[in-house]
Amino acid sequence: MEFFFLPSSSKSLVLLLWLLASVLSAAVAIRAEKESVIEMYLHDIVGGSNPTARPTTGLLGSIYSGQVPFASPVGFKTPEGGIPIPNANGALPTVNGVTGIPLASGLSGTTFAGNSQNNLQSQIAADGLGLGFGTITVIDDILTSQPELGSQAIGRAQGIYVASSADGSRQMMVFTAMFEGGEYGDSLNFYGVYKIGSTMSRLSITGGTGKFKDARGFAEVRSLIPPGQIATDGAETLLRIIVHLNHY
């Protein structure tokens, strides 16, 4: 049996590398984890001249794009004297009387902020007709630091939401919040089910990039009535999102 011995210089190098690896491992192990709370407001606008959300599939997608009888490009307004065609269940779509957008569209269900003189919001009910079930809506929503649509923009929420319940009361949301510099920067990924009409819904944080790399946590989502004067001619849903994060 033969034995091999390292020169003393090689032994010193090996020892130095081992010490360096130990120090790096310890530094990673003791890396402090940060806790952050971020508050932001998401503006989801369906229809109008500057929409940020567009239904792309299902009956609502066809209505929105004008592919069904008597549908205008942004709604379902029956021509004067015309007769709307019901769906297979004999039900007629209910619409926002101001914009003509089907009330099952977007994150409000059949709740909408009408551009009326008294600036009130009308609450009807969830989409009991099932018109929105299975509809995929693509979003490029504005994120702001305050509830007002014209307040400081901090980024965009880009992704989709899907009407995942037959009565239209739940939307499965998958989107990335991409922050534009300022206090935050970089991005966060959101996933979960938003419950229309609920006091609060929770979404999971599934990671992020940059300073939010390896982030985990959850977001509390609440629906608010858009404040002040109407800043859009579409149907807007305002969501207050409070994010609770753990990250390095």
Image: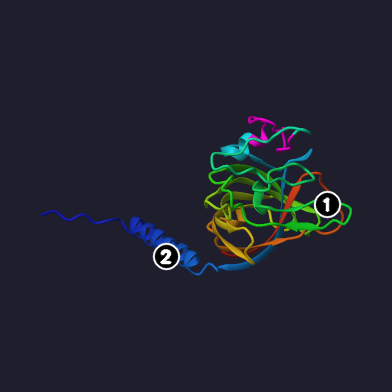
Are the residues flagged by discs 1 and 2 in contact, CB closer than 8 Å?
Answer: no
Mark nearer the N terminus (1 vs 2): 2
Viewer-side label of 1, 2: 1
Query: Viewer-proximal residue, 183 or 57?
Result: 57
* In the depicted structure, whether residue 201 falls above or below residue 88: below
Mark 1 is surrounded, within 10 Å at the Cα level, by few (under 14), some (14 to 19) or many (20 or more) other residues, namely few
Residue 248 is at least partly visible in this image: no
Query: Viewer-proximal residue, 73 or 224?
Result: 73
Name the amino acid, label 1.
Gly
Give the left or right position of residue 145, taking residue 208 as reference: right
Would you say residue 110 sits in the magenta stretch? no
Query: Viewer-proximal residue, 35 or 191?
Result: 191
Residue at the disc numbered 1? 150
Measuring 65% from the left and 57% from the top, which residue is drawn there? 125
On-image quarter of the N terminus: bottom left
Magenta stretch, residue numbers? 63-78
Residue at the disc numbered 2? 22
Q: Residue furthest left?
A: 1
Residue 58 is at least partly visible in this image: yes
Measuring 86% from the left and 58% from the top, which residue is drawn there? 228
Residue 139 percent location from the top left of the image: 65, 44
Residue 3 percent location from the top left of the image: 17, 56
Measuring 24% from the left and 56% from the top, which residue is drawn there? 5
Name the amino acid, label 2.
Ser
Query: For the residue labelled by badge 2, is the local secondary structure a helix, a strand or a loop?
Result: helix
Give the left or right position of residue 13, taking residue 33 as reference: left
Distance of label 1 from label 2 (alpha carbons): 52 Å
On-image quarter of the C terminus: bottom right
* In the depicted structure, whether residue 55 falls above or below residue 40: above
* Residue 196 image-quadrant placement: bottom right
Residue 4 percent location from the top left of the image: 21, 54
From the image, give the main secondary structure of the stretch colored magenta. Answer: loop
